[in-house]
Amino acid sequence: MDSSEVALVQALQSLIEAHNSRDWDRVRSILADEYEFHDHRPAGFGTIVGREGFIEFLLAAISLVPDRRMSFTRWFRDPEAHIDPARPETVAALLRAEGTDQYGSPVEWELMTVWQAKGGLVTWFEAYPHESVEEAIERARQLSDSANEEA
């Protein structure tokens, strides 16, 4: 990974650590004001625009699985990508979440994710079913290409 990808991965790791410790001020400091979440899973949550709306979504999810903890289990990089540190960075990753619901039953799931950041802040998150690896990687490539064309 080049330095811009490392910075994005570090920001995402910090985001997950902040989520897992329920440090919402830290989450706010990592997400851009114009942050967008797009959920493409069959029983997904649609689109959420704005940092505060996404934090409300996280709080609602935690009310269902109060001890939910998340972690990245695999990173995917487009080997043909040429990332310029001055441009937005994009990465795909497999995200795992687990915990216990309010009835004491174990809950765990995985999803493919696509993330984008600019200027050190996470600006974009897309969720896909865990088996949609190729689709997520292709989407990361599209986002990266379009960001590079805009720059």
Image: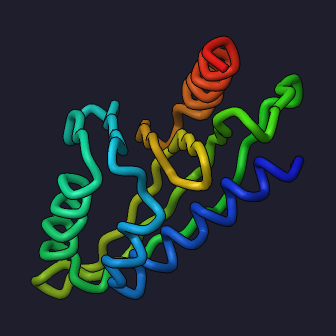
- Residue 123 vs residue 12, the one in the foreground: 123
Residue 148 vs residue 122: left or right?
right
Residue 108 coordinates in the image, percent (x, y): 38, 67
Please count the marks in the image: 0
Residue 59 vs residue 108: left or right?
left
Residue 124 coordinates in the image, percent (x, y): 45, 40
Q: Is residue 71 above or below residue 94?
A: below
Can the viewer see residue 43 in this picture? no
Which image quadrant for residue 97? bottom left
Q: Is residue 150 above or below residue 93?
A: above
Q: Residue at x 21, y 58 (%)?
A: 52
Colour logic: rainbow
Residue 24 vs residue 10: left or right?
left
Q: Residue at x 34, y 42 (%)?
A: 34
Quadrant of the drawing holding the C terminus: top right
Residue 76 coordinates in the image, percent (x, y): 73, 42
